[in-house]
Amino acid sequence: LAASYTKTTWEPMMVLISDFTPSPFKITTDLNGRQFRPGDTLAITTMAKLHGGGPYTDASARITVTLKKEEFASSDPLARGFSFDSFSAETPEETTLAQKEGNIDDKGSLLTSIQLPESSVYFGKLTIESAVRDDRGKYISSRSNADYASRERFVGLRSDTWILQQGEASSVEFIVVDA
């Protein structure tokens, strides 16, 4: 758009208008611990509560447990400077360990138990997602996280030099820590 009385040129503005309908309820996901190992039973409590108070009932729900591998590091000051190799090249970055479906009860809750299977991931983060279907058919979800350690002990190495020379003595320190 231009006008004869000015050198300014105007461009049309595009505006996207969408309809936003908030969910009438919120979801919480609680776990029975902060750290888990293969074979442990993960007890997941999913709660669906109306914003105005009271339970959100009679809805289908889906629980998904995923595991993402992460680098292990000890928070102990004695382990400062040590490197812990917790990766395997064949292990995928993220994998779904379990997925279950169920229904929210008359108290607005769903209790789910999942036994964690063996995994090639040495150390990682579990993400537990509870998704509850609303009356429009859309899922409202909540997540919780926990640490995952498939080994009882981790070995860390530390060297005072990065370059090792053949025929010259060198030292490498090691430390063994638990998760």
Image (cartoon, rainbow, N blue to C red):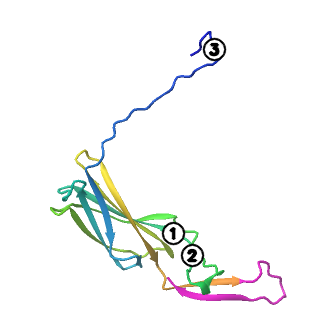
Q: Residues within 10 Å of mark 3 (few under 14, many from 20)?
A: few
Q: Which residue is mark 1?
A: 69
| Badge 2 or badge 3: first in the primary sequence | 3
Percent of width and height locating residue 76:
56, 84
1 and 3 marks in contact (CB < 8 Å)? no
Q: Which residue is mark 2?
A: 86
The vertical placement of 168 against 14, above or below, is below
Query: Which region of the structure is painted magenta?
Result: 159-179
Percent of width and height locating residue 9:
61, 19
Give left or right: position of 92 versus 16. right
User: Which picture quadrant has residue 71?
Assistant: bottom right
Percent of width and height locating residue 20:
34, 40
Q: CA distance from mark 1 to mark 2?
A: 8 Å
Percent of width and height locating residue 163:
79, 78
The residue type indicated by label 2 comes to: Ser
Q: Residue at x 37, y 35 (%)?
A: 18
The vertical placement of 67 against 62, above or below, is below
* Circle on res. 6: 3
